[in-house]
Image: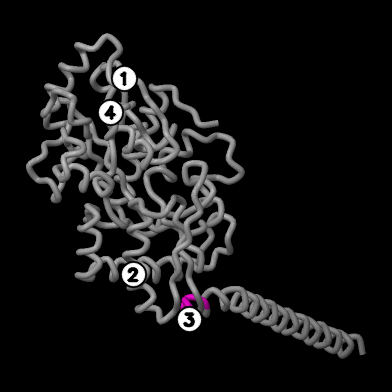
Amino acid sequence: MSSNCGRACWASSVNACFERSTTRRHTMKSIVASLFVLLSLAAGPALAQADTYPSRTVKIVVPFTPGGSPDAVARAVSPGLGQAWKQPVVVENKAGAGGNIGGETVARAPSDGYTLLLSGSGLACINPKLYTKTSFDLVNDLKLVTPLGFVPIVLVVHPAIPARTLSELVAHARSLPGGLTYGSGGVGTPQHLSGEMFTLYTGLKMTHVPYKGNGPALADLMAGQTDIMFSPINSVAPLIKAGKVRAIAAAGSQRMPAMPDLPTIAEAGVAGYDSSLWLAMAVPSATPKDVVDKLDRDVRSVLGRGDVKASLAQQGIEQLAGSPVDFQDMVRKDCARWAKVIADARISAD
């Protein structure tokens, strides 16, 4: 009896163990299956969004007033994007605070690819060092996607200034007890910082005269109220042609295709000087990678169109060459250069 009972008890124990093991396996399978379903549900909207993006109107926010280089670039690429996507692409100007108002608008927008930012050197590199009390993070709340082009800067003077070369301008500046005056579109603008970089690199004494925008600054330069100015090429090219201002040098690292005979400031003797600006498309930082990748491909495709190239060239805007890695490397170097200028010149916009 005891032997039979022992065998029966042993068999019962084995069966119970087998049942528990089988139950555990079924439970684990159920858990894994449930997790897979949850992950699929979580990923589904993003994948579906990327497959159908865009399915409605896309807005490009330009954080500056109409008529400038960022606005010109946005309006050059938006028709091509609209044709490629078969959806309306609208450009909205939201100026103020050096571009921060428009930047914040996009940073706080849904991260779905339907609100884009025409960003650039100012927002990505300059403003984070100038504005330390913003209500959003200029660096981490926005992501650069596609480089759109260089905006060449030109050093121009009033025609009465007795200088046609950079060396003549420097000599003239050193002969003036009070130095030169230069206008800009406001404190912390790229025009202002280009002038500060020039004083730091040359040791010249110059007085900054800030205006509320590039237009008023140029008007006073033409009127002889200021001596010199650093300005985007598209703003001054007609004035140079009309003889209302005189071009002295290109402020970038290379000569401009629009004015190939004009030497750079570095070529003319100020080693290392480069205040060229770049523009790029940006999105809220949490935008899904698939959407970012599609946006990047489509923007690059539009930039390669002949009509878009011609439109940008007419504005004096040079397209950026190189890979995304090259672009990120350029951004890092550019941000470091502007950070040093801002620190050395002790500039703050707060």
Say whether disc 1 or disc 4 marks the residue closer to the N-terminus.
Answer: 1
Q: Quadrant of residue 223?
A: top left
Say whether disc 3 or disc 4 marks the residue closer to the N-terminus.
Answer: 3
Most common secondary structure along the magenta stretch: helix
Q: What distance separates the C-alpha of mark 3 from that of mark 4?
A: 56 Å
Q: Residues within 10 Å of mark 1 (few under 14, many from 20)?
A: some
Q: Amino acid at mark 1?
A: Met
Q: Which residue is mark 1?
A: 206
Q: What distance separates the C-alpha of mark 1 from that of mark 2?
A: 45 Å
Say whether disc 1 or disc 2 marks the residue closer to the N-terminus.
Answer: 1
Q: What distance separates the C-alpha of mark 4 from that of mark 2?
A: 47 Å
Pointer 1 with pointer 3, Cβ within 8 A: no
Q: What distance separates the C-alpha of mark 1 from that of mark 3?
A: 55 Å
Q: Amino acid at mark 4?
A: Gly
**4 or 2: mark nearer the eye:** 4
Say whether disc 1 or disc 3 marks the residue closer to the N-terminus.
Answer: 3
Q: What distance separates the C-alpha of mark 1 from that of mark 4?
A: 16 Å
Q: Which residue is mark 2?
A: 297
User: What number is the disc on residue 224?
Assistant: 4
Q: Residue at x 58, y 40 (%)?
A: 134
